[in-house]
Amino acid sequence: MRAKASLKIVLALALSAGLALGIYFGATHYFANTKKSPGTKSYKTLKRKLAYTSDPRQLLEKARESEGRADWEGALAWYNILVNNLRDDDPRKGLVYHRRAFCYYQLEDYPRARVSMEYGLNHFRDLPQVDSALFLMAQIYSKLGDFELADKTYNTIIKMFPHRAEEAKNLQSQLPQNLKKP
């Protein structure tokens, strides 16, 4: 009886060791044949970015530096790290959603730009530069072909920000005339 129990334990350990070795060699093979191996540029970039995750000011600075170089993907990576690391009550988080939407817009990923900008506008009442955020929102709606929402957004800008009303009216006039659905 005792021999059977010992044999079962030995077999279980052997199977576990075999499984662990299979996973190890499978992962080694996977990383050796993908761009995610420790020797590649993207891995080194990620490792370098992770060194800054503790200081939001440095993350914002890095994101803005990337934007200054028109490195929209790089800036987006920094903003994504910020979104995950800032508390919801941090006043910078709304700005991060705005800038992230701008990066998506520059990359012509309008659906993601819409989601990010709508989230920023709806969840962060103290969003800085709300007029610029609304202009971006209207442009995103226009790129997505949702001209009715673009028109409504320009009307909101005209009402809320009289100093930017002419700019909004000019862009609004460029929308297709048949906005209203019958």
Image (cartoon, rainbow, N blue to C red):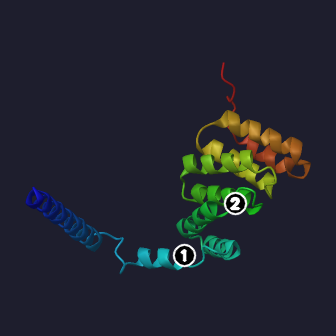
157, above or below 65, in the image: above
Q: Residue at x 9, y 57 (%)?
A: 4
In contact (CB < 8 Å): disc 2 and disc 1? no
- Please report whichever mark, 2 or 1, sits nearer to the chain's N-terminal start: 1
Q: Residues within 10 Å of mark 1 (few under 14, many from 20)?
A: some
Left or right: 73, with 164 as reference point:
left
For the residues labelled 2 and 1, the Cα–Cα distance comes to: 19 Å
**Measuring 60% from the left and 77% from the top, which residue is drawn there?**
52
Residue nearest the observer in this picture, 135 or 119: 119
Can you name the residue that lies furthest to the top here? 182
State the residue lying farthest toward the right: 162
Q: Name the spot of residue 170 as percent of width and height, x first.
A: 78, 46
Which image quarter holds the C terminus?
top right
Identify the residue under disc 1. 49
The percent position of residue 29, horizontal first and vertical second, equals 23, 70
Residue type at numbered disc 2? Arg
Toward the viewer: 37 or 72?
37
Examine the rendered structure and indicate whether residue 50 appears above or below residue 132. below
Q: Which residue is mark 2?
A: 87
Q: Secondary structure at mark 1?
A: helix
Name the quadrant containing residue 96: bottom right
Q: Amino acid at mark 1?
A: Lys
